[in-house]
Amino acid sequence: MAFTSRILNETEQEFFNQFIAGHPKGHLLQTWEWGEVKAKTGWEPIRLMLYRGEEPVAAISMLKRRIPGIGKSILYAPRGPVAPIDDYEVLDRLWQAVRQVGKKEGAIMLKIDPDVPVAEKEFKAYLDRAGFRPAKTAEGFDGTQPRFVFRLNITPSEEELFAAFHSKTRYNVRLAARRGVTVRITHNKEGLKTFYEILKITAERDRFLIRSYEYFVALWDLLVENDLAAVFLAEYEGKVIAGTLALILGEKAWYLYGASSNEHRNVMPNYLLQWEMIKWAKGRGCTMYDFRGVSGDLSEDNPLYGLYRFKKGFNGVFTEFVGEYDLVLAPFYYHLWNVAEPLYYKNLRTIAKLRSKLR
């Protein structure tokens, strides 16, 4: 049966999302709304659907960004494609369609970081045969996804899930509840603003960068308002002391952002937040809860080991994905990108250091 492909338009948003949500490899970062979120940060979303006869068999949401000065662009499909990873004919046809789009858009490559565990060795071998190259994370390549995560099967009962937690995790969840910590989902932007203020405190304390409040407003407007995300707030003695943002699509949920104030950390709000999010996801019919990124270095002297230990306590499965791969569409410019891009960001760091010394 013949294959065809086409770019979807805005009237087909629901059709596209239904396919993504119902597919085993569906991911929220491949939804129509996520493309619209990224459109507010300089990316242009392109949604491609592949058909076998009349039946849709694969989809990919690609984000396009122009490369300044050379009239070329890059394509990135976060956690894409949404396709059967063992049907190589479908995949081959999909990449063929991607190449056609890439040629039209002046793209030098397509970057993917698929939702496929590294244990799927046949898929990894297929990518090599299909012309993909393993890629190192580009410093300026906005949005690439964590290679290492914890995932929890939440099909067992709440009692069974809780009993399987590490004893210290169970203790801390109970401690938070016993001390009077409560968790609620906020339904207004005042709650979002409160969450963001705590996130700023967290970023300053733990020394990491966060996006602007406007970005979180976009997450609210496009995801929360469309029932694809929720903001959870933990309160203690009448004050919000921690919060999280979770994503949900079909039978899957993801923990995306977490924040905690410098006050009352001893009442363990983060443990209760995770447990309430797991119960929320289970109540929504989810079968998988993803704690998202952890370090691949599991040694106890790693500065990020505490995050690993926290997430491990909920009895999730440590999962490594196949990582980032590039489908080269314009070899000369792709080589130029790999040479010039690290130098560009190295110079930016040098300039930033010089400026800081002059202040």
Image (tube, grey):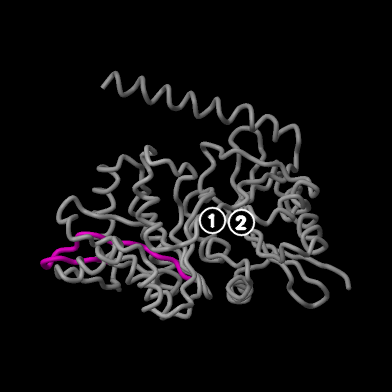
**Residue at point 36% right, 42% down?**
209
Give the percent coordinates (x, y) of residue 73.
65, 43
- Is 70 magenta? The answer is no
In this picture, is 282 found above or below 96? below
* Highlighted magenta segment, given as a residue range: 233-248
Mark sitting on residue 319 = 1
Mark sitting on residue 117 = 2
**Residue at point 65% right, 62% down?**
47
* Amino acid at the residue labelled 1: Thr
In this picture, is 20 found above or below 302? below
Could you tell me what secondary structure mostly forms the magenta stretch?
Answer: strand
Observer-nearest residue: 270 or 23?
270
**Residue at point 52% right, 38% down?**
140
Q: Does dot 2 land on a helix, a strand or a loop?
A: loop
Give the percent coordinates (x, y) of residue 240.
19, 63
Label 1 Cα crowd, 10 Å radius (few <14 / some 14-19 / many 20+): many
- Is 241 magenta? The answer is yes
Q: Is residue 210 left or right of residue 173?
A: right
Quadrant in which the C terminus appears: top left
Give the percent coordinates (x, y) of residue 124.
71, 51
Quadrant in which the N terminus appears: bottom right
* Amino acid at the residue labelled 2: Pro
Q: Is residue 69 left or right of residue 218?
A: right
- The answer to whether the residue labelled 1 contacts the one labelled 2, judged by CB atoms less than 8 Å apart, is yes
Give the percent coordinates (x, y) of residue 284.
44, 80
